[in-house]
Each structure stands twice: as structure tokens, then as C-alpha cells.
Amino acid sequence: MGVSAFVFLSSSLFLFYSVFSNAVDSITQSQSISDSKGTNLVSKDGGFVLGFFSTGNSNNRYLGIWYKNIPVRTVVWVANRGNPIRDSSGVLMLNSSGSLVLLSQNRTVVWSANSTKEAGSPVVELLDSGNLVLREKNEENPESYLWQSFDYPSDTWLPGMKLGWDLRTGLERRLTAWKSPDDPSPGELSCGIVLHNYPEIVTKNGSKIYGRTGPWNGIRFSGALWLKANPVYNFTFVSNKDELYFMYHTIKKSVITRAVLNQTFYVNERYIWIEADKKWIPYCSVPQDKCDSYNLCGAYGNCKIGDSPICQCVEGFKPKSPETWNPDDWAKGCVRTTELSCKDKDKIGFVKLVGLKLPDTTYSWMNESMNLNECEVKCLNNCSCTAYSNTDIRDGGSGCAIWYGDLIDIRQVAANGQDANLQDVYIRIPASKKVNQEVSPKKKKVNQEDVIDKQKMKVRVAVAIAIAVVFGVLLIAYCICKRKNFREKMKNKRMIDQNIDGQNEDLELPFYSLATIAIATNKFSSNTKLGEGGFGLVYKGILADGQEIAVKRLSQNSRQGLSEFKNEVISIAKLQHRNLVRLLGYCIEGEEKMLIYEYMPNGSLDSFIFGWPMRFNIICGIARGLQYLHEDSRLRIIHRDLKASNILLDSKMNPKISDFGMARSFGGDQTEGNTNRVVGTCGYMAPEYAIDGLFSVKSDVFSFGILLLEIICGKKNRGSFHLEYSLNLVGHAWKSWKEGRTLELIDTCLKDSCILSELERCLHISFLCLQQHHEDRPNMSFVVMMLHSESSLQEPKEPGFYVGKKSLSSSKNQSSSTNEITITSLDGR
Ligand SMILES: *[C@@H]1O[C@H](CO)[C@@H](O)[C@H](O)[C@H]1NC(C)=O
Ligand SMILES: *[C@@H]1O[C@H](CO)[C@@H](O)[C@H](O)[C@H]1NC(C)=O
Ligand SMILES: *[C@@H]1O[C@H](CO)[C@@H](O)[C@H](O)[C@H]1NC(C)=O
Ligand SMILES: *[C@@H]1O[C@H](CO)[C@@H](O)[C@H](O)[C@H]1NC(C)=O
Ligand SMILES: *[C@@H]1O[C@H](CO)[C@@H](O)[C@H](O)[C@H]1NC(C)=O
Ligand SMILES: *[C@@H]1O[C@H](CO)[C@@H](O)[C@H](O)[C@H]1NC(C)=O
Ligand SMILES: *[C@@H]1O[C@H](CO)[C@@H](O)[C@H](O)[C@H]1NC(C)=O
Ligand SMILES: *[C@@H]1O[C@H](CO)[C@@H](O)[C@H](O)[C@H]1NC(C)=O
């Protein structure tokens, strides 16, 4: 009653609201929101509504907040979560002492906002952010609100909402899932910041830890690779003596996004509202993969996606049950290969591990003003200390974090290696394991005054080690040379030289000695490792003249034999194109085969996210590079293993095709071949190649089609599928395209930056490349032409699906795969 009178007397702006919603954005003491009268509050900008609602088929009534203009009613906050009103008697009002109360029949208090202070002339207002606040009439300062719904979150985390603690009052803002889609009462799944000495975000299932992000490292949470600069939202982590919270804001005001804790699937999922489709699209979700399951690998176990088994022990440790290192035993973790003696500090060293999610911080300690040396001393002086690290990785690292007891829930986060924001953690191991070059022996009786002495000592030790290493390498190289494979080695080298000489006029490809490469890569130390593939490891090195290089060290048991090695050396040495990665030299000594490339500071395509113009530029670059390989180079090269991780990006984001190890070169017109050894990567192989071993430039075109689709959709072909159809990405994309639902395919992060027609054209071209029969697929020069013209395109025939070996078994698997999809869309992999 009071509400409508108020509206009627207000300006025409309010009249506008009254026509459509019969609502205002605030009430005072004389007014109320009543279920039976159907009144509600609407935020000033019309984004959110506060009112009464029911769930499912029940008659239970709840007071809550939802988006006004989103047709699928999406509730973001509920007042009386666990205490529904059984009829429509609910009334929200300010009682005479200024408290905000929800009353049902007979004025029973169902819920109340427990503000600590009594208000003089209180106002309840629904803000544009979706925050319901109780404040003094003339008080606009958020710090002085008497009460706000953002302090008592339900399952939804909105922009501007703090997740964490007000340390002055002890107030914790924590998300709690709904029990079920129809029951908003608090479920078992909850998420918040834990107040360990070194805090982190932890999701719990009941009282058990379900997943953790790892602590904040100045840039992101150490285990949350998904948390990076993106076009949708920015984020801040605040930690001081008064407050400890994590918060995000949308970058564009028009974007509607929310993160919600969902107990049906046990995930924390971020959605974005797509107005054109009238749909919430999942943007990113946690857990992201199996390695996000808390403590999957037990103490000192390192969870590595893509490794088999997925659980590996960290350096200096071995499986506790080595005979049966199967999934049930992983949780038992790893034990030291050599027992640690605490007393003799001489016998203690630390191994530096790079790119890990930091261990569980339940038993941790931190000091933000200490440096790494002081940190090491502190750790060394306490027998219970098992590891230490910097707390902030910015500007070369600062702060000190220390772990006590077993290290739990570690995972490898640097999937691709070329990620600058890696955190090192130093784990205590016996110094007798000095074989490892990372271990630095410690002086006895270290104390604070000794630090300077110790540093001098360290320099001396380092110099000694460096000399020893150089000596050792030279000695090893010398011994290798002395041995009988010396002749063989010389033969190999001659063969390569001859091949190179024979087929190309004066090609000068520098030969690097093993010693040079060992020095450049700090003796292949693990912190220079950029990544690894089926062929072996890739290291970053710096030559004596300062040039940065990437060293591909072929593993001795790699599938790439001497013939393939030669093949790659010859192929790449001859090819010069701005979209191909440049080979600087090679090294072949004894069993060692290595390729030296220019270093690409931006890693590979599969780890990136960017807007459409950049992606289109990359697509065109790859197409031109491949066209050159197929048609323009003097030799015809079929790459045979084109995939996202083989596309490197230079500092200007120009794509460079790499890894010619599997390429076959042909003279003249030969464009087809047959092989008894199928090499390549599942998910990228053309059907005729995967099944019959028949390869041609057209099988590369097929792989290009997959790559194109992945770039557009922001999803991996392999391992991605759609819930409804359980098809791979190609199958799903084809189906959506046929049904005219292309918009759903497009990577959500592209929607703002794309020229739709250009993007649809790329999608169309991708289907032309993916056609079942290789005769139907266009060649690369035609692809390049199509990319740059606006002429109409042929209708593609059905694509060749090659679903690969991976099948979906249990429903649990399905949900984890779903997560993978959604997270990859954020990663743009
Ligand atoms: C107003 O509501 C609060 C919270 O339920 C209660 O403590 C207080 O006694 C109420 N005041 C009056 C005058 O009823
Ligand atoms: C409300 O009060 C009436 C009369 O005092 C009583 O009959 C009824 O049971 C009460 N209802 C509830 C829900 O307490
Ligand atoms: C608010 O009320 C809830 C339950 O009614 C209680 O658990 C909580 O401690 C109260 N908070 C404050 C700040 O009084
Ligand atoms: C969890 O998400 C699914 C899919 O979006 C949805 O159908 C379900 O209602 C959600 N569950 C809860 C408890 O919100
Ligand atoms: C959550 O905890 C409950 C009760 O302990 C358990 O039954 C359920 O399997 C757990 N769910 C997950 C996903 O861990
Ligand atoms: C996040 O974006 C908003 C809107 O563009 C801006 O006002 C805010 O300062 C940004 N915050 C951070 C931490 O970058
Ligand atoms: C943190 O380290 C600094 C520098 O070593 C020291 O001055 C300070 O007292 C330490 N703080 C705590 C709480 O230990
Ligand atoms: C080592 O650290 C543990 C855990 O903080 C502590 O309880 C113990 O007193 C420390 N010991 C020494 C010798 O400082």
C-alpha cells in the first residue's frame, strides 16, 4: 500500500518503473515488501530484483535476489535459506527498533538481518550491484553500512563481492552451495579463504577439504592457472591486518557474469550471460582436471596431467608402495630415497622445484619482508621445516613461506613450460644427493650473522661446482668420443653434412658441441626446462654471446631415430619463412641428438587467449606457413604433426610452425605416401592417415582444419565433447553448424572482439578442410585465398570424424571432462 502511494507521487521516472514492476529500490521504516501484495524492490538500473519466490513444485516461499531481465530466473541470494515460509504471508520490513526482519503469519520472525548497531532513520536499498544494504538515511559510505547481503553470501559470487575475512570483526564471507536445485538451504559444499599463516582459498565438502587454489603469489593463486588476465573480469587479492579477501569486477559494465558453487556437480563454475542466445554459458570451472582433487597423490606426490601414472614423486622421493603404484596407493604418497638426518646441517640441501602448485599451507609460516636467503636459513634451523619459497614472485621474488611436516597436494601447473609466472619451491633433502646440480651443500651452524660469510662461501662453492660441471661435461664428452661410437658419431655427422651439402648448395648449419649446450642450459637443469613432448625435453639456454635459444634434446628412447633427426635437420635448415620456426644449429654427440632453435618468448599457441583479430592473424600465419611447406618451398614438406602445441608464438604474436621431426620431404610432384609407422597426434590425424597410414598434403590440411576449429571454439578436439551428444569437437561443431547454431560454438571470449562474418567464414573453411575424403579438401593455397577473399564458399561434405581411442566411461568422468571444456575456453587452448 505504502509502496504504491510512494511510487504514484514520485517523478515520471519512477512512474516508468511503476508501470512495469510496481517497485522502488528502497524502503524506509513505514514501508514493507509483501509476498501477498506481490511488491518487490528493483535496483536503480533495473538489473536486480528483491522479492519472494518458490523453487521447483514446492509452495515454500523464500525472500531472495535475482536478475530482473534474465528470463531464466537466476537467484543470486536468499535470505531465509533454511527456513522457508509455507504460505504467502511473508513480509519484509524494518521494525520499530530499526532491524530488518522477515515476518510470517502472526508476526513470527523467520529471518532477520543482525546488524550490530541500532539505526535512527534506517533505509533498506537494493544496489545496482545486487547488494541489499541497510544504512542510515544519509549515509552513503559502504564502510558504514549497518548490514549488507554481500557479507552473507549464498552460493553465488557476484562482481564486487568480497570472498574472505574482515579480521576486525571476525566476519567470514563464504559461499555455500544450495543443497539441491530446489532447496536453497546450505549444502555440504562451501568455499572460502582459510586463515592459515599463509592463506589460500579452500573448497570443502562438509568438513573435508575438496580442493584448494594454493596461496596467493602476488599474481595469482599458485595452483590456479586459470586465473589470468582475461577480457571478462579483473581481480584483486587484499591481505592486510584488517582484511583478507579476494574480489573481482567485470571489465565491461555490460557483461553479466557470476560464479556459483554447485553441489550437483561439485564444481565452482563461472557463467556469462549471452543476451543474443538468452543463455548462461559456462566460462570456466574448478576443479579443472583430476589433479585438482585434493591430495590425490599423497605426501610428496606430484600430480602431472599427461603423465602416466598421473602421480609422480618429487625429486629425492620414491613411491611408498613401489610394487603396486596404482591409483589406490597414490594417496599413500612418497617417501625419501635417503633418510634425512637433522642434526648435521652439513648433510642438508634443498632441491629447487619449478612450476609447482605450492603444498597445503595448513602447517605453514610466512614473513613478507624476509628474502630467500633468510628463508633458507630459517628453514635450515628447524628440523620440522620441509620446504620454503618466496611468497611473492613479482620482481624476482620476495617474502618467505615455510612449510612444516609432510608436503601435501602438490601438482605441476606449468603445463607448457614457457610461462614466466612460475613459483619455485625448495624442498629439504639430504645433501649426499649432490649428484643433482640443484642441491647446494650447506655450511654448519648457520645463523643470521653468518649469512654474509655464507654468501661468500656460496659463491666459492658455486664457482667450484661450475668448474666441476664444465670439467665433468668435458670429461664425459671426451670419454664418449674415445669410445667406439666415436667413429659412428663421426659417420652420422658426415652423413648429415653430406646430406646437407648434397641437397643444398652452401648451407652452413652450425654444429654446437655438447659442452656448449650444457653450459648454455646450466647442464640441462630442471629450471631451464621449457616443456616436454613425446620426443624428449626442451630447454631454454643462453649462449655465451647472450643469444637465447631453445634446445630440443631428443630422448634416447624417443621414436625419432637418426633418420628422423637427419630429416628434421635437413628440412628445417633449408626452410626460411617468417611463419616457420628457425633452426640455429644442431648437436650430435654419442647418444645425444639435439636441435637448437630460436627461442620464442611467448610459448605455444595452446596456452594462449586473445581476441579475434589476433587469432585471425595467427590463423592466416599458420595457413601461409603451411602453404609454403606444401607448395612454395623447394622441397615438398608434409608436416604430419600439425597441432596447437607445435605452433609457437614470437614476441609479436606471430605464429611459427615448429617440429618438423615427422615431416617427410619429397622431390618433384610426389604428394602422397604410405607409411607403416603412423606418427602424429590423436585428435589431429586425418581418417585416412590414422586408419590406413596414407598421408598427403591433404592430411595436413585436415589437421589445419582441426586447429582452425580449436582456435575458433577455444576448445581442444581431443578430450572435448558435448554433454548431449558425446561427440568430439568436430562432431559437435558440425552438428551445431548444420542446425544453424554456430554462435554457441564460438569461444565466449571472442564474442566481443569478433567480426562475425569473418569468424563464420573461418568455421566454414575449417569444415572444408575436415571433409572425409581427402580429394574433397582444398589445398593450402586455396585455403589462404579463401581466408582473404569474400567470394562464396562451397558447401562442405560431412567431416571425417576420428574420435580416437578415448571413450567415456563413468558419469564421474563426464563431469570432469565438462570442466576441462569450460576451463579450456578460458585458457583459449
Ligand atoms: C526488531 O527485530 C529484532 C531482530 O529480530 C529484535 O531483536 C527486536 O527486539 C525487534 N524490535 C522490536 C521493537 O520488536
Ligand atoms: C496464528 O495465530 C492463530 C490465532 O492466534 C492460531 O490459530 C494459528 O495457529 C497461528 N498460526 C501459526 C502458524 O502459528
Ligand atoms: C547473525 O546471526 C547469526 C544467526 O542468527 C549468528 O550465527 C551470527 O553470529 C550473527 N552475526 C552477528 C554479527 O551478530
Ligand atoms: C548445477 O548445475 C546444473 C547445470 O547447470 C543445474 O542443472 C543444477 O540445477 C545445478 N545445481 C544446483 C544445486 O544449483
Ligand atoms: C562429499 O562428501 C560426502 C559425505 O562425506 C560423500 O558422500 C561424497 O562422495 C563427497 N563428494 C565428493 C565429490 O567428494
Ligand atoms: C577492474 O576493472 C574496473 C572496470 O574497468 C576498474 O574500475 C578497476 O580499477 C579494475 N581493477 C583492477 C584491480 O584492475
Ligand atoms: C619478518 O622479517 C623481518 C626481517 O627479517 C623482521 O624484521 C620481522 O621481525 C619479521 N616479522 C615476524 C613477524 O617475524
Ligand atoms: C620448529 O617449528 C615448529 C613449528 O612451527 C615449532 O613448533 C618448533 O618450536 C620449531 N623448533 C625450533 C627449534 O625452532
Image (tube, rainbow, N blue to C red):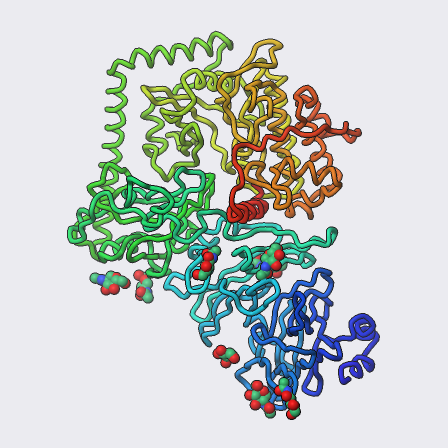
Residue 302 seen in render: yes
Q: Would residue 655 be found to the left or right of residue 41 on screen? A: left
For the C terminus, the quadrant is top right
Examine the image and state in which quarter residue 668 appears: top right
Q: How many marks?
A: 0
Q: Between 750 and 137, which is closer to the camera in this rendering?
A: 750
Q: Position of residue 420 (x, y in %)?
A: 46, 44
The residue located at (64%, 77%) in the rendering is 86
For the N terminus, the quadrant is bottom right
Q: Would residue 240 be found to the left or right of residue 93 on screen? A: left
Q: Position of residue 735 (x, y in %)?
A: 69, 38
Which quarter is ligand 7 in? bottom left
Residue 669 versus residue 429 in the image, above or below: above
Residue 328 versus residue 677 in the image, above or below: below
Q: Position of residue 520 (x, y in %)?
A: 36, 31
Q: Between 65 and 726, which is closer to the camera in this rendering?
A: 726
The residue located at (33%, 43%) in the rendering is 313
Examine the image and state in which quarter residue 42 appears: bottom right
The residue located at (63%, 25%) in the rendering is 701
Examine the image and state in which quarter residue 150 appears: bottom right
Name the residue furthest top: 502
Q: Would residue 595 be found to the left or right of residue 183 on screen? A: left
Residue 202 seen in render: no
Q: Between 696 and 719, which is closer to the camera in this rendering?
A: 719
The residue located at (54%, 49%) in the rendering is 815
Q: Position of residue 87 (x, y in %)?
A: 68, 78
